[in-house]
Image (cartoon, helix red, strand yellow):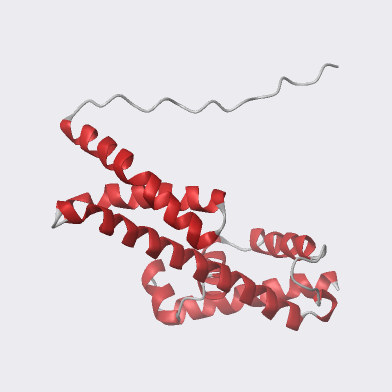
Amino acid sequence: MSAAPKLVAVPAPAPEATTEGDDALRELYETHASAVNQRLYWLTGNADLSRDLTQDTFLVALRRLDTVKDPDAMGSWLHGIAYNLLRDHRRSQQRRRGLWRRWRSRNESAELAEGDAGEPQLLRTLEGALRGLDADKRDAFVLRQVEGLSLEEAAALLDVSIKTVSYRALKAEEHVRAAFDSTS
């Protein structure tokens, strides 16, 4: 039996500008992307992360372009978006580390140092537990425990009452805790 051919991703060429707006967006990117990426690199020390955040910056900018009041301040505006995205990324990382610390403290068999080889097993256990939840409970758990949102914020995002999101999060946490207890 012969091996399957290896698939290689080939990036699509940039679309040709078809309108004046497309030209403006292309010019915006060509003018500012390098500076935004460089600043993000210096802030993160991570080339991959800085590239990802730079792309996200221009996606956000595209959606909000009509809100720009001073076209001469476009560079500052883009750097502000980039920094806000970086701040959000850092908060997310802190929440993720906090989640691991909470689960480790609850599960004595999971007392592992940061980066320990057991961490992938913890992640697999958590992912398996989350797959065992219905979408409503999984959403509530992720927003409350992983993302660290308040009950009010989670309820608003899910468009349900605070009582409903509290109940769903509690039931999901019980399910996830049981998954960790069964692995110890």
Along the viewing direction, whichever of 49 and 105 lies nearer the viewer: 49
Where residue 132 appears, x then y in whole percent?
67, 61
- Asked if residue 8 is positioned above or below residue 131 in the image, the reply reads above
Quarter in which the N terminus is drawn: top right
* Residue ID at (38%, 52%): 36
* Residue ID at (50%, 28%): 11
Quadrant of the image occupied by residue 134: bottom right
Q: Is residue 159 left or right of residue 184?
A: left
* Residue ID at (42%, 46%): 55
Where residue 143 appears, x then y in whole percent?
50, 70
Where residue 8 appears, x then y in whole percent?
62, 25
- Asked if residue 92 is positioned above or below residue 167 in the image, the reply reads above
Along the viewing direction, whichever of 93 and 23 lies nearer the viewer: 23
Quarter in which the C terminus is drawn: bottom right
Q: Is residue 166 left or right of residue 179?
A: left
Quadrant of the image occupied by residue 110: bottom right
- Asked if residue 38 is positioned above or below residue 121 in the image, the reply reads above
Where residue 102 appears, x then y in whole percent?
67, 80
* Residue ID at (25%, 27%): 17
